[in-house]
Image: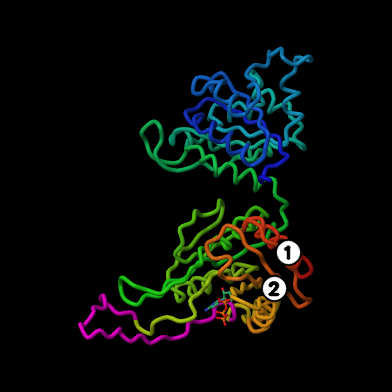
Amino acid sequence: MGDLAGKHIVLGLSGGIACYKSAELCRALIKEGATVQVVMTEAAEQFITKVTMQALSNRPVFGSQWDDRAANHMPHINLSREAHAILVAPCSADFMAKLLHGRADDLLSLMCLARPMDQVPLLVAPAMNREMWVHPATQRNVAQLKADGVQVLDVGTGDQACGETGDGRMLEPQDIVQELVAFFAPKTLLGQHLLVNAGPTFEAIDPVRGLTNLSSGKMGFAIARAAREAGAQVTLVAGPVHLPTPRGVLRHDVQSAQDMHARIVELVDQANVFVATAAVADWRPSTAAEHKIKKDGSGQAPELDFVENTDILTEVAHSPRALSGALFCVGFAAESQDLAEHARLKRERKGVPLLVGNLGPQTFGQDDNALLLVDAHGSRELPRAPKLELARSLVAEIALRLKPSH
Ligand code: CTP
């Protein structure tokens, strides 16, 4: 089951070179379980053929308001009434201007105007040259479209087809899909600010070596994504991992446990939920050598002294804001055995209202996991599932627990 299972999306293409990405977008929407009806403007057909879009969507493409395939001769009504959302991607500067004025001289604009606004949301993914994007006329149109209830997605930054570099590219297909999934998600965390830490830390021994662990950061990144889908403002502090930043999430990269501690202390006052998924190293070498430690020929390994790192979660969970209920803390426990007992004891030791237990060897680096939620009332198992699915369930659990006190 994809994230868009059961959703019927009208994918509108207006004229722009980004139409080449719409083919990929169509595939990605279908891969997530959506059915897709493509509607193209005449200008879009200059960039990509109906044949391509029909083959990918597995449905006839519509282009004209005079199309006589439907008995009632009203494609603008029929197509929009079936849709869970209309997504215009790419949305050209010209098409935005048209939407803004309620013009309806082609099927796509006619359909957008004729849609029942309270039932069929309209999302647009702008795509244009950077000068066109920053032009006051475009920016005015963006602001007005938002005021009219249109979901105007961000634009991407980078190289443009015209050879210039800047803002205005259409978002990548996967980003647009993420935005659409987030759009449909229940907004259980609206108004909340989540701070999440994720991944391992890296404790330097010398400039080229260090100690770390097998945490991939996937669970923390999934929680950040799920919380943003649920409407929260999300800040993510990540140790050294190779994962893309979830859309709409503010990310801070750190290396060592000390860096992570410092960054969390700096950011935690703005948050009202702290989710500690990071596998923070418990110890670090007491000093990191300035230069690479060389073999001295004696056959003896160098002696390393360790000092304990601050327990970030325990410190935050005992801060005045956490103790007063203004900050809700969620801890994780990576165990290798006796999960239920260790998780129960760890929750008490760390002083957190909710602790999420998992078995380290069965989760590190994997795409799925099983969780045990432990709170003052007992425990509940979330059976093995993809991490994003578990993250969404956990976010729903957090939202339930926030309601009484916020
Ligand atoms: N944690 C932390 N700072 C540390 C160590 C752990 O904030 N220096 C947090 C983790 O982010 C996690 C929770 O504490 O949310 C539990 O981490 P875990 O490694 O399971 O437990 P430890 O405290 O290291 O205890 P032990 O090694 O005894 O299992």
Q: Is residue 397 above or below residue 126?
A: below
SS under mark 2: strand
Which residue is disc 2 drawn over?
354
Is residue 196 or residue 167 the one in the foreground? 196
Is residue 101 or residue 253 the one in the foreground? 253
Q: Amino acid at mark 2?
A: Leu
Label 2 vs 1, first from the N-terminus:
2
State ligand 1's quadrant.
Answer: bottom right
User: Which residue is at 44% across, 72% downward?
Assistant: 212
Cα gap from disc 2 to disc 1, whole angstroms: 10 Å
Q: Which residues are magenta?
A: 288-314
The main secondary structure of the magenta stretch is loop
**Do residues under tags 2 and 1 come within 8 Å of each other at their CB atoms?**
yes
Residue 181 position within the rendered picture, expressed as x and y whole percent measured from the top left? 65, 46
Residue 187 position within the rendered picture, expressed as x and y whole percent measured from the top left? 71, 53
Residue 397's tag is 1
User: Which residue is at 56% across, 31% downward?
Assistant: 91
Q: Is residue 37 above or below residue 233?
A: above
